[in-house]
Amino acid sequence: MTSKPRVRFAPSPTGYLHVGGARTALYNWLFARHLGGVFVLRIEDTDLDRSEARHEAALIEDLQWLGLEWDEGPGVEGPHAPYRQSERLGIYREHTERLLREGQAYRCFCTGEQLEAERASAAADHRPQVYSGRCRGIAEPESARRAEAGEAFAVRLKIPDHPLRFHDLVRGEVEFPNETVSDPILVRSSGMPVYNYVVTVDDALMEITHVIRGDDHISNTPKQVAIYEAFGWKLPEFAHLSTILGSDREKLSKRHGATAVASFREMGILPEALVNYLALLGWGAEGGTREIFSLEELTREFRLERVTASPAVFDWEKLHWLSRHYLKQAEPARVEELAWPHFAGAGLLPVLETAGPDVKAWFAKLLALFLPAVSQLDELPKKAGFIFGFDVGAARANEENAAVLATESAQKVLSAFAAKVGAQDGTVTPEQFKAWMNEVKAETGAKGKGLFHPVRIALTGSHSGPEFDKLIPIVEEGSRLTLPVHVASVRERVERFFAE
Ligand code: GLU
């Protein structure tokens, strides 16, 4: 390749950035970065009824969160500005005039009813529902006169009478017979140009060399090819990425759970985990089964030739596996800051800005203990909830707990343990706790689960959980802090358990 490749991500700000769009953005970004090319962000907001500034702002925030910065586009501008289609209407108008002048396009005066009747009769005869081309034959002076007289018209492209071909880097040579493509509308009678038209004009003027996008656009591509041909422009390379499916092999949608990038952020999945996961949705590195890739490694390894044409299935288990990997790897201070709002939101911690250093230091220990147990940060308040308190009645009533507590041996263990706790003031250390358990073991003859499970239920409400060595200091230290919810000490826990 002689000149630098130029690619673009061209979202319509009509909703949130979802998994499919984010993967398209990522593949474009990786392709550009791998080859030292240019990544353009273009906002396709010609659908004025559905485009909203808040969606554009959210899209930008999501792309920035993923780390996919653009070289040209809103905020950075560049040689082909403006990068918002609503600000390029004059450019499209000039190009429409050129096509009309050169006889590549024509004014179509057909009314909605006429077109509807055509469609109905084609359907009745089982013919393809392509526009008849009725207005193609109107001579230019006549057409200009009617337009001048104020008659409403759309502008249509003359589809050439040869098959429309393009090269797709994922699918190979693609050909559409021209008979299946209506003379497409370029500009509606309202004066608004349509997607297929503006996308082509912009891709050409912005010197896009590779159009990488979802395969939901593949049926648009022949129309776009015809537009390139009408202007005499060189075709770019195309790469249509396969559809993303849910676990039931239906097109991924909200039914399958979260699909918006913002939802993953809110759940507490790190951007590097999502980026790594999205990269694997339809691409794999050369000759390997490797699955963990940083953005830098992806940039080095990414090749469009290794993108598969078969649909990718969204796999939560794999995303969670990657998420756990990256949460474990991340700087603790970063994870603390991200995890904090989940606890503050649950009313367990004060807002971060008002928390003292002692609370922060305590939370760091708590987090280190519970982080390995979660796949996303929003699971933490529930996992660690018992530290802040638990319902003794419910813990006693829980079937498995009740079976443990009902034995005579458990009763003995608990009273022996309670006697030790009651006999001594001051903070309980892990060493002290261990010594007590050894004494209780000697006094009651209980051991293993029979010894530990009743005590664990009394202190935590559950017979399983983190090691006591780590748990005891967190409970004891927490009990001395001022928090929205009082953390009961070991002593307070034992008292409460017996009181209820
Ligand atoms: N604006 C289109 C969309 O959001 C993308 C068009 C394209 O990539 O060609 O689906």
Image: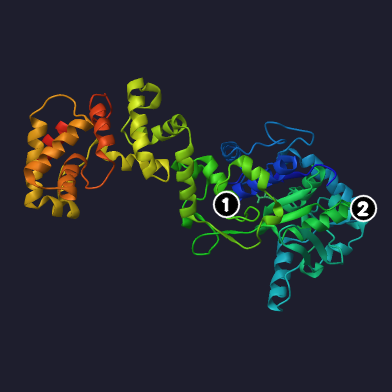
**In the foreground, 446 or 190:** 446
Q: Is residue 8 above or below residue 214?
A: above
Q: What element carries label 1?
A: loop
- For the point 67% across and 44% down, the residue is 300
Does mark 2's beta carbon lie closer than 8 Å to ligand 1? no
Q: Residue 456 carries which label?
A: none
Question: Label 1, label 2: how many angstroms apart (C-alpha)?
Answer: 54 Å
Closer to the camera in the image, 319 or 440: 440
Among numbered discs 1 and 2, the one appearing first in the sequence? 2
Q: Position of residue 243 (x, y in %)?
A: 61, 59
Residue 397 on image: x %, y %: 15, 51
Tell whether 41 sits left or right of 384. Answer: right
Residue 164 on image: x %, y %: 82, 63
Q: What residue type is labelled 2?
A: Glu
- Looking at the image, what colour scheme do you see? rainbow
Q: Residue at x 39, y 26 (%)?
A: 352
The residue pinned by badge 1 equals: 290
Q: Residue tagged by mark 2? A: 102
Quadrant location of the C terminus? top left
Q: Where is residue 195 in the image (x, y as percent from the top left)?
A: 72, 51
Q: Against 102, is 63 above or below?
A: above
Taking depth in this image into account, of 488 and 189 the one nearest to the observer is 488
Residue at (61%, 55%) from the top-left corner? 288
Q: Hey, what amino acid is under mark 1?
A: Arg
